[in-house]
Amino acid sequence: MPRYKLTIEYDGTPYYGWQRQDRLASVQQSIEEAMQKFAQHDVSVFAAGRTDTGVHALGQVIHVDLERDWKPEKVQEATNGLLKLEGHPICAIDVAKVDENFDARFSAVQRHYRYRIINRIAPLTVELDRAWWIRFPLNVEAMNDAAQALVGHHDFTTFRSTDCQAKSPMRTVDLLEVRRVNETEIEIIAKARSFLHNQIRSFAGSLKLVGDGKWTKQDLVNVRDALDRKRCGPVAPACGLYLTRVDYPDSV
């Protein structure tokens, strides 16, 4: 069966996360139902990462096996047309035929995320459900300096959801930067081969405490080394998180 790699963009607001669930809307089910209509057979799609309820994607990657040898552009056109017809804020921005050994999850070598904060007095309107609104000023420089304590290979038990199913809390974070985009927007950029459940949102909530002066960098280090989920800062809202890109070996 021909295998296809699709790069997917979606607004996660209407969905209870990526993963298919009984009686709850999910991104996975929406894509599968659309593809089944034109493929005329049962379809299962597999993603590079399972985003949570309300989390968005600009560059999620999935793979799917289809019985017919479709042209990639036809797969893209049919998938997008059926998703739009059903009113889903999901689209395939790229489709390519790949080797049968390609796996969206296990072939990935790097995952990129962005967390968006709107830092202003006025509440959000256009950006509602697209970013975390924080009314009081944040010290971006202090946040970025503290973030470097979370870069590298660590036991991230403190920043791991109690529901996390990963076998180990050990992860290597290759990049974690906090930077100002403009007068009101702040973004946190994270890059690693893989992340634990809620890890980036836990990072964002803890770094916010540094930004508003409640924690110092040393406080964050102490929290990291405590290996205690109860010591973590508040988990930031899902609406600010975006899966922006997934990298694969050059041969893929």
Image (cartoon, rainbow, N blue to C red):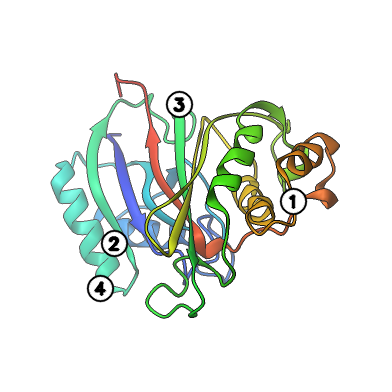
User: Marks 4 and 2: CB-CB under 8 Å?
Assistant: no
User: Marks 3 and 1: CB-CB under 8 Å?
Assistant: no
Tell me which amino acid carries mark 1. Answer: Trp
Q: Give the mark nearer the N terminus: 1 vs 4.
A: 4
Q: Which residue is mark 3?
A: 109
Q: Residue at x 57, y 65 (%)?
A: 137
Q: Give the mark nearer the N terminus: 4 vs 2.
A: 2
Q: Residues within 10 Å of mark 1 (few under 14, many from 20)?
A: some
Q: Which residue is mark 4?
A: 85
Looking at the image, which is closer to me, 155 or 73? 155
Pinpoint residue 12: horizontal percent, then vertical percent: 45, 64
The numbered dot on residue 215 is: 1
Q: Is residue 73 above or below residue 120?
A: above
Pinpoint residue 193: horizontal percent, then vertical percent: 52, 30
Tell me which amino acid carries mark 3. Answer: Val
Q: Which residue is mark 2?
A: 37
Mark 4: secondary structure = helix
Q: Residue furthest top?
A: 251
- Badge nearest the viewer, 3 or 1: 1
Measure the alpha-carbon separation of dots 4 and 3. 34 Å
Q: Give the mark nearer the N terminus: 3 vs 2.
A: 2
Q: Give the mark nearer the N terminus: 4 vs 3.
A: 4
Relative to 252, 228 lies left or right: right
Q: Residue at x 85, y 43 (%)?
A: 228
Q: Quadrant of the N terminus?
A: top left
Q: Residues within 10 Å of mark 3 (few under 14, many from 20)?
A: few
Measure the alpha-carbon separation of dots 3 and 2. 32 Å
Tell me which amino acid carries mark 2. Answer: Lys
Measure the alpha-carbon separation of dots 4 and 2. 12 Å
Pinpoint residue 69: horizontal percent, then vertical percent: 19, 38
